[in-house]
Image (spheres, helix red, strand yellow):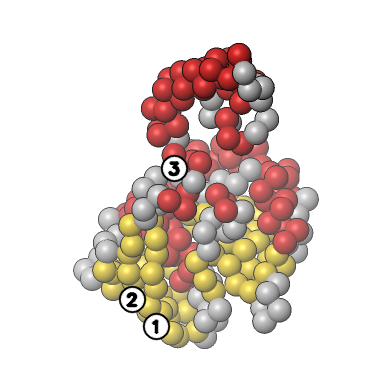
Amino acid sequence: MTSKWRFLPDYCRLAAENCARAPVGRLQGFARAARSECYSRIAPIRRGFKHLEDPVTVKATIFKAQLQVNDMDRSYFHAHSLTLARHPLETDERLMVRLLAFAMHAQETLQFARGLAFDEPDLWRKDLTGAIDLWITVGQPDEPQMRRACGRARQVVVYTYSGRSAQAWWQKSAAAAARSKNLTVVDLSAEDTQALATLAKHGMQMQCFIQDGEIQMLGDTTTVPIGLTNRASAR
């Protein structure tokens, strides 16, 4: 199947593909008419799926964050000026979980990536040769996505955060996760990530404190403790 017609219903796609190959002469007019009819009927559907067809063309909302990380456990104390691009389909909660994940793994070489739509993680860290040291995904990747990530990176971390949905995902994914020696899965408290979402704004001043495995995210006037459950650990 050619990608040009992949959003057409079967009956319309087949007609369009057949007509596109029609020879010149008597069938040429029929080909043009059939293609025109198919396009007119499917154009609203194609517009509705445009964000799936070409994610690059979708205008993202830009968030700026000044993040001070004070990680007693790693003896890491550093300020980061960050730019986060939020896709129209991304929620404030997911945006802030990505920021939290950055704070928990903060290093100079840690960067936000483009996400699974581009076969990339949400964050990654590479060495000087371009090899991926750390791959961080937010949400609920499927088994093939986890397997590919574990094959491409030295360490993979998945952060889930959506309560019952995350629990249902884990029940289906636990066996696959156990087969990957370089995979860590952490579930974040849904109540805490929802509270974290209320701190989202276009210009953020945030602090993250980590000590003895306990994490707090601080906004201008609000402190959000982050509860987490370690579901699987790399070994």
Query: In this image, 67 relative to 201: left or right?
Result: right
Which residue is at a point 55% across and 49% down the rendered structure image? 117
User: Dot 1: what SS?
Assistant: strand
Residue 65 occupies which quadrant of the picture? Answer: bottom left
Q: Which amino acid does label 3 sit on?
A: His
Q: Nearer the viewer, residue 196 or 216?
A: 196
Q: Distance between the residues labelled 3 and 1?
A: 34 Å
Query: In this image, 119 relative to 181: left or right?
Result: left
Q: Please identify, in this view, whether the residue under mark 2 or under mark 3 is nearer the observer.
A: 3
Q: Residue furthest front?
A: 25
Marked residue nearer the N-terminal end (2 or 1): 2
Task: Please give the label number shown on residue 66.
Answer: 2
User: Dot 2: what SS?
Assistant: strand
- Report if the CB atoms under discs 2 and 1 are less than 8 Å apart: yes
Against 19, is 53 above or below?
below
Q: Residue 159: percent from the left, percent from the top?
A: 54, 55
Against 31, is 6 above or below?
below
Q: Nearer the viewer, residue 16 or 223?
A: 16
Q: Residue 119: percent from the left, percent from the top?
A: 61, 53
- Residue indicated by mark 1: 79
Q: Which amino acid does label 2 sit on?
A: Gln
Which residue is at a point 49% across and 41% down the rendered structure image? 52
Task: Please give the label number shown on residue 32.
Answer: none
Q: Residue 81: percent from the left, percent from the top?
A: 38, 78
Which residue is at a point 28% across and 55% down the rendered structure image? 198
Look at the image and tell me in which quarter the N terminus lies.
Answer: top right
Q: Distance between the residues labelled 2 and 3?
A: 30 Å
